[in-house]
């Protein structure tokens, strides 16, 4: 019998469990024997925290002998072994999940959430029990929220409110900046984010109630700014589709960001909204290379499907933007011009870009992923990222966090601007309107003369 967490833990009652919590092995003699649980709970003390910070700060470069400082530097660098994943604090060696179990997933590991008092690790007790653990499967938990519209005051984005019908995202994009939010559920930003999902099935009813309030002032609502509203489980729950029906009924403007072809399913709702200036759709394109796309975004639509989606939306008269995000130095930033050319040919009318962001746990997750899949590029990619953020993995300063700073970031930005202007994709396009916003009258209420 294999024991693995079957449901999402309640953060209040199980704050420390964020991975496989037990192992069972088979006896060579035949009958199954339950092995003692070989899970170590490692307290996150001040010492281990310092060790973590020290490990993160440790450079990836290999030290070289004094005699080779000048003439032999090139020889030493070429002979250096592939970079290793920087060590975590003592004891956290069992967070990496075996490749076969995480097939089709983006993250490599499943470290405990940053708010947990202890880190649980998994290691082999000598019974080869790790081989018996089943593949990770997607689990969905329904949650009941009190409100559905989230407010923000960030000067880096063009909206002040958004809707996220789902928490966690099955697309598995390793770079997703929403991953750290799973820590608030007592879960990992790694594989938990891709496999332990939350859905708000009553989100459309909550939205209608909030829009009906007399104090509500309409402005553009963004969807897909945290997790993708058209991730695979939307096929079953259809929460996003029902949200669009509510917004259409109220005449409320909405901007959608997705990397899924499923958005074309809702053209019957989006096209009439577009005629009234109520909707824009942005399709995120990271690369035109299907292999790189599958590695970075294992369960997202392939590049040719996204281009086909742009074409279908544009043909239906829906304003469509191509969003080259994120641009990763030395990995996909060389494709900027090609992506814009392909998107323009497919019918895109605007374009935007965002440089890679590595806040909180994402820095470690991205580093693990990079060393696993691109060991020969790891030093170079990480070095360029730090160049754009003042020597750090990430700079959260407004105005810099989404664009970066320094010569490399400036060069990528100018390349994008030149290509966008050449193709007519630069600048602000259609602005959505709030002129059609109306609060539907409840059933049985007499309409006024001017309704």
Image (cartoon, grey):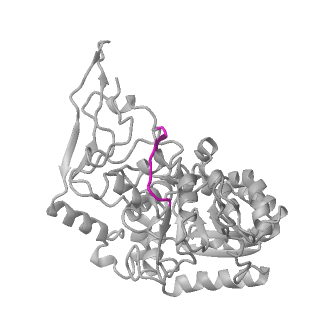
Q: Residue at x 40, y 83 (%)?
A: 390
* Residue 260 in view in this figure: yes
User: Which quarter of the figure has residue 428?
Assistant: bottom right
In the picture, the quarter occupied by the N terminus is top left
Q: Where in the figure is residue 417, as x and y percent of width and height?
A: 67, 84
Prevailing secondary structure of the magenta residues? loop
Q: Residue at x 63, y 72 (%)?
A: 334
As displayed, is residue 102 above or below residue 284? above
Q: Where in the figure is residue 31, as x and y percent of width and height?
A: 30, 12
User: Which quarter of the figure has residue 189?
Assistant: bottom left
User: Which quarter of the figure has residue 33?
Assistant: top left
* Residue 332 in view in this figure: no
Q: Where in the figure is residue 68, as x and y percent of width and height?
A: 34, 77
As for residue 317 lying within the magenta part, the answer is: no
As displayed, is residue 232 above or below residue 402? above
In the picture, the quarter occupied by the C terminus is bottom right
Q: Residue at x 24, y 33 (%)?
A: 125
Q: Where in the figure is residue 122, as x and y percent of width and height?
A: 29, 41
Q: Is residue 98 left or right of residue 209?
A: left
Q: Which residues are magenta?
A: 137-148
Identify which residue, 384 or 118, lies in the foreground.
118
Identify which residue, 387 or 22, lies in the foreground.
22
Q: Is residue 7 left or right of residue 316?
A: left
| Residue sitting farthest toward the right | 315
Q: Residue at x 58, y 78 (%)?
A: 158
């Amino acid at each position: 019998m294999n024991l693995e967490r079957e449901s999402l833990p309640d953060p209040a009652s199980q704050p420390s469990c964020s991975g496989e919590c037990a192992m069972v092995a088979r006896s060579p003699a035949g009958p199954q024997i339950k092995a003692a649980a070989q899970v170590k709970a490692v307290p996150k003390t001040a010492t281990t925290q310092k060790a973590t910070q020290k490990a993160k700060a440790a450079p990836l470069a290999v030290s070289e002998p004094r005699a080779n400082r000048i003439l032999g530097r090139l020889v030493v660098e070429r002979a250096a072994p592939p970079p290793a994943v920087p060590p975590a604090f003592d004891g956290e060696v069992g967070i990496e999940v075996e490749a076969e179990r995480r097939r089709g997933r983006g993250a490599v590991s499943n470290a405990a959430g940053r708010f947990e008092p202890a880190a649980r690790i998994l290691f082999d007790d000598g019974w080869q029990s790790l081989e018996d653990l089943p593949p990770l499967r997607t689990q969905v938990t329904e949650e009941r929220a009190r409100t559905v519209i989230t407010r923000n005051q960030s000067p880096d984005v063009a909206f002040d409110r958004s809707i996220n019908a789902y928490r966690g995202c099955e697309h598995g994009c390793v770079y997703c900046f929403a991953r750290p939010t799973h820590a608030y559920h007592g879960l990992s930003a790694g594989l938990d984010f891709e496999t332990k999902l939350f859905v708000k099935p009553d989100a459309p009813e909550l939205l209608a109630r909030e829009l009906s309030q007399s104090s509500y002032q309409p402005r553009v609502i963004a969807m897909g700014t945290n997790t993708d509203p058209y991730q695979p489980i939307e096929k079953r729950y259809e929460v996003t589709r029902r949200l669009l029906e509510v917004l259409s009924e109220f005449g409320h403007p909405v901007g959608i960001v997705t990397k899924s072809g499923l958005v074309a399913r809702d053209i019957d709702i989006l096209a009439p909204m577009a005629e009234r200036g109520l909707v824009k759709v942005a399709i995120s394109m990271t690369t035109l290379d299907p292999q790189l796309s599958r590695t970075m975004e294992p369960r997202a639509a392939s590049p040719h499907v996204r281009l086909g989606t742009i074409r279908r939306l544009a043909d239906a008269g829906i304003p469509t933007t191509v969003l080259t995000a994120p641009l990763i130095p030395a990995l996909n930033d060389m494709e900027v011009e090609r992506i814009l050319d392909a998107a323009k040919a497919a019918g895109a009318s605007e374009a935007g870009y965002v440089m890679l962001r590595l806040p909180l746990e994402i820095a470690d997750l991205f580093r693990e992923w990079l060393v696993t899949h691109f060991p020969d590029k790891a030093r170079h990619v990480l070095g360029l990222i730090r160049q754009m953020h003042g020597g750090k993995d990430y700079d959260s300063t407004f105005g810099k966090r989404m664009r970066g700073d320094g010569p490399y970031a400036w060069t990528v930005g100018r390349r994008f601007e030149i290509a966008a202007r050449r193709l007519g994709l630069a600048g602000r396009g259609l602005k959505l309107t709030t002129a059609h916003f109306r609060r539907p009258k409840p059933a049985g209420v007499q309409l006024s003369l001017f309704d």
